[in-house]
Image (spheres, rainbow, N blue to C red):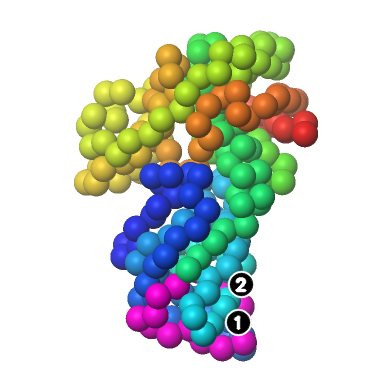
């Protein structure tokens, strides 16, 4: 990948100066743009895409979607004209949208750490995936034969009251393997991976944007815990 992903280092950076490396016309008034660095989060890992604005001295484009395609991160923009390769560009994300997505994403991880601390994962239940968009949920492979919702809510409340810090760092696969409470299948083993740590709780592999602490998320409402076939689906929301 030619683009330096600034959001992996600092989730709170709202804008950047970059250089345009490549431009591909998509259709009338639509282009995709490759940059040398970016603060724009590409949709993935259950977190929705960032949106915002790219502008040079003589050109402006609205970023409506950011996606990783063929190993590169592309900014999909609408504009009256094409930007120019080699130009310097300033990018600014829609921060309200990002912050909302970040809170939902971190909230999902707090529930996931609660599941681990309660002893449900990784043996009884195996984390499968999460979606942190409009109707957020987390899915686990496996089923627990009791109503675990009240216990999860209590543990999540406790983690938030403790105001625990999140931190992250790129480490080699074998180090992460030793440290993580579980590892997703199909992680690349030949490059440093981003370890997400929650103070006193544990470590997971993660490439999304994160808040600094559990308390910053505010209240998390753990909704229904539903059994769907051989899986357990936990729905959640943020009340304010
Ligand atoms: Zn994540």
Where, quadrant-wise, is the N terminus in this rendering?
A: bottom left
10 Å crowding of disc 1: few (<14), some (14-19), many (20+):
some
Residue at horizontal 43 percent and vertical 81 percent from the top:
23
Dominant secondary structure (helix, strand or loop) of the stretch shown in magenta: loop
Query: Image point 43% across, 85% down: which residue?
Result: 84
Residue placed most toward the observer, 203 or 216: 216
Give the quadrant of residue 226. top right
Relative to 149, is 2 above or below?
below
Magenta residues span 75-89
Tell me: is circle 2 under 8 Å from ligand 1: no
* Residue in view at x 40 percent, y 52 percent: 6
First along the sequence among labels 2 and 1: 2
The spot of residue 47 in percent (x, y) is 57, 47
* 83 is within the stretch colored magenta: yes
Find out whether residue 84 is within the magenta segment. yes
Residue 96, how many percent across, how many down?
A: 66, 50
Q: CA distance from mark 2 to mark 1?
A: 7 Å
Marks 1 and 2: in contact by CB < 8 Å? yes
Secondary structure beneath dot 1 equals loop
Image quadrant of residue 18? bottom left
Q: Which residue is mark 1?
A: 79
- Which label sits on residue 142? none
Q: Which residue is mark 2?
A: 62
């Amino acid at each position: 990948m030619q683009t330096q992903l600034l959001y992996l280092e600092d989730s709170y950076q709202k804008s950047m100066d970059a250089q345009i490396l490549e431009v591909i016309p998509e259709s009338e008034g639509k282009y995709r743009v490759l940059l040398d660095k970016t603060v724009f989060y590409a949709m993935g890992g259950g977190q929705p895409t960032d949106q915002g604005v790219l502008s040079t001295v003589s050109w402006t484009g609205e970023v409506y979607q950011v996606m990783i395609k063929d190993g590169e991160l592309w900014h999909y923009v609408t504009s009256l004209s094409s930007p120019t390769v080699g130009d310097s560009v300033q990018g600014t994300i829609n921060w309200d949208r990002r912050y909302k997505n970040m809170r939902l994403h971190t909230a999902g991880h707090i529930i996931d750490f609660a599941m681990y601390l309660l002893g449900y994962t990784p043996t009884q239940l195996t984390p499968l995936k999460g979606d942190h968009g409009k109707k957020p949920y987390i899915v686990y492979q496996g089923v627990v034969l009791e109503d675990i919702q009240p216990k999860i809510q209590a543990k999540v409340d406790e983690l938030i009251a403790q105001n625990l810090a999140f931190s992250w760092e790129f480490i080699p696969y074998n180090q992460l393997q030793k440290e993580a409470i579980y590892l997703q299948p199909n992680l690349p083993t030949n490059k440093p991976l981003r370890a997400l740590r929650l103070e006193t709780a544990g470590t997971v592999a993660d490439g999304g944007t994160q808040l600094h602490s559990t308390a910053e998320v505010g209240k998390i409402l753990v909704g229904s815990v539903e059994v769907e076939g051989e899986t357990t689906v936990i729905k959640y929301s943020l009340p304010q």
